Image: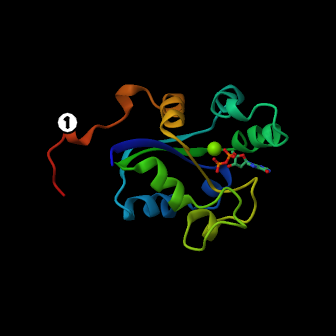
Amino acid sequence: MATEKTLVLIKPDSVQRGLAGRIISRFEEKGFQLCGVKLIHMDSSRAARLYEPHLGKPFYDPLVKYMTSGPIVALCLSGHNAIEQVRTLMGATNPSQAAPGSIRGDFAQRVDYNCVHGSDSAESAQRELPIFFEPGEIVDYEANYTKWV
Ligand code: IDP
Ligand code: MG
């Protein structure tokens, strides 16, 4: 299993509800490392870049409106098999089907306001991370830092 980096977004409703810290804790408790953290209010061009694969779907316009409605927290997380494991911690896209104990299972009710985004493949992570982080903004612990823990 490879060490991977993935993108997580804590969506506007979750930030507004004060859930950002608890959601970040879920990932930290699992052992994923925070390599990048940003609070940003996306404009529609950034949201369009992120959701380009969904262009034309019925939920596209409401999704862009929702995701640009207020600040989000963008995370770059690193760890073993991070892309798949982060998706497992998030739970199913539709919170009605998300297992209790998952982030969406515990914190969300609706498919359209489902708390978090996570890259769904290595290709998606590679495409999505640069939408939020410059290469120099992503921390490389192994290369640059003494290991304390
Ligand atoms: P994902 O976030 O689990 O990867 P995607 O299928 O990539 O799910 O959809 C992107 C986002 O679009 C979802 O997280 C959700 O906010 C929204 N979405 C997906 N399917 C629906 C739907 O059927 N109705 C309304 N919104 C949806
Ligand atoms: Mg997706």
Viewer-closest of 47 and 41: 47
Residue at left 68%, top 55%? 13
Residue at left 51%, top 61%? 89
Q: Quadrant of residue 98?
A: bottom right
66 sits to left or right of 76: right
The kind of residue on which mark 1 rests is Asn
The residue indicated by pointer 1 is 144
Q: Is residue 84 above or below residue 60?
A: below
x and y, in percent, of residue 93 in the image: 67, 55
Residue that lies at the very extreme toward the front in this rendered image: 1
Protein image colouring: rainbow
Graded by Cα atoms within 10 Å as few (under 14), some (14 to 19) or many (20 or more), the crowding at tag 1 reads: few
x and y, in percent, of residue 73 in the image: 54, 46
149 sits to left or right of 7: left
Q: Is residue 84 visible?
A: yes
Residue at left 53%, top 29%? 127
Viewer-closest of 22 and 4: 4
Q: Quadrant of residue 52?
A: top right
x and y, in percent, of residue 32 in the image: 37, 54
Q: Quadrant of the C terminus?
A: bottom left
Pointer 1 residue Cβ closer than 8 Å to ligand 2: no
**Helix, strand or loop at disc 1?**
helix
Q: Is residue 36 visible?
A: no
Q: How many marks?
A: 1
Q: Is residue 91 above or below residue 132?
A: below
Residue that lies at the very extreme toward the right in this rendered image: 58
x and y, in percent, of residue 64 in the image: 75, 38
Residue at left 63%, top 50%? 11
